[in-house]
Image: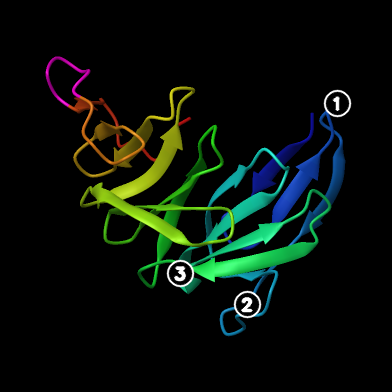
Amino acid sequence: GNKYVARYYSQVEKYDSSNNFVTEWGSYDYYSASNGYFRYIYGIDIDSADRIYVSDYKRGRIQVFDTNGNYLSKWSVGTSYVRGIAIDGNDNIYVVNNNGDVEKYNTSGTLLQNCGSVNGAYLIATDSANNVYVTKYYSKRVYKYDSNGNAVNSFSGNNYFSTSFYPYGIE
């Protein structure tokens, strides 16, 4: 299928199944909080209805688009900065903010649950069992939680494993 690539500052690029460039949308603007403008993109994910969710880091919001880049909606998260975003198999949207808080939203942007905190967290991912993985950059760790924010101790009795590098992304 199609692939969507987020450029760090401000744009989303769409490629077809043969990796040909199709289109792009978004723009960087330091001052404007208008729809489709970004101030650093940290994460991107797609739900089961092919809506594209983009984390707008410095504006502390999630913007939602269709597959052609048409703006659909937005919502704010619980802090001024939002980093990673991941969508599980039930279309729950997990966001990690600048404080390391992991928050669970529905597709309308309603906060469903605070799922704990990982100080220094950067990005987030989910697996097929709807577990949530959070990268902690400076301590070189990846933490694992269930969909309710409970620690899953599946790494030698811990809910994290250490890496030999500073984990920035995870999938």
Going 56% across and 55% down the picture, which residue do you hit? 8
Q: Main secondary structure of the magenta part?
A: loop
Which residue is the site of mark 2?
29
Mark 2 neighbour class, 10 Å CA radius: few under 14, some 14 to 19, many 20 or more:
some
Q: CA distance from mark 3 to mark 2?
A: 14 Å
Q: How far apart are the two marked residues, 1 and 3, measured between alpha carbons? A: 34 Å
Asked if labels 2 and 1 touch by Cβ distance under 8 angstroms, the answer is no
Return the disc, 1 or 2, that comes first in the chain's sequence.
Answer: 1
Q: Is residue 109 above or below residue 13?
A: below
In the rendering, at what x and y percent does residue 75 appear? 54, 68
Which of the 4 image quarters holds residue 15?
top right
Q: In the rendered structure, which segment of residues is drawn in magenta?
A: 153-158
Q: Residue at x 85, y 51 (%)?
A: 23
Q: Which residue is mark 3?
A: 60
- The nearer-to-camera label among 1 and 3 is 3
Density class for disc 3 (Cα within 10 Å; few <14, some 14-19, many ≥20) is many
**Element at badge 2?**
loop
Task: Locate residue 54, reporting x and y percent.
Answer: 59, 55
Residue that lies at the very extreme toward the left in this rendered image: 157
Residue 114 visible in the current orientation: yes
Q: Amino acid at mark 2?
A: Asp
* Residue highlighted by disc 1: 18
Q: Secondary structure at mark 1?
A: loop
Q: Amino acid at mark 3?
A: Gly
Mark 1, other Cα within 10 Å: few <14 / some 14–19 / many ≥20: few
Mark closest to the chain's N terminus, 1 or 3: 1
Image location of residue 72, percent across then percent down:
73, 64
Left or right: where 22 falls relative to 81: right
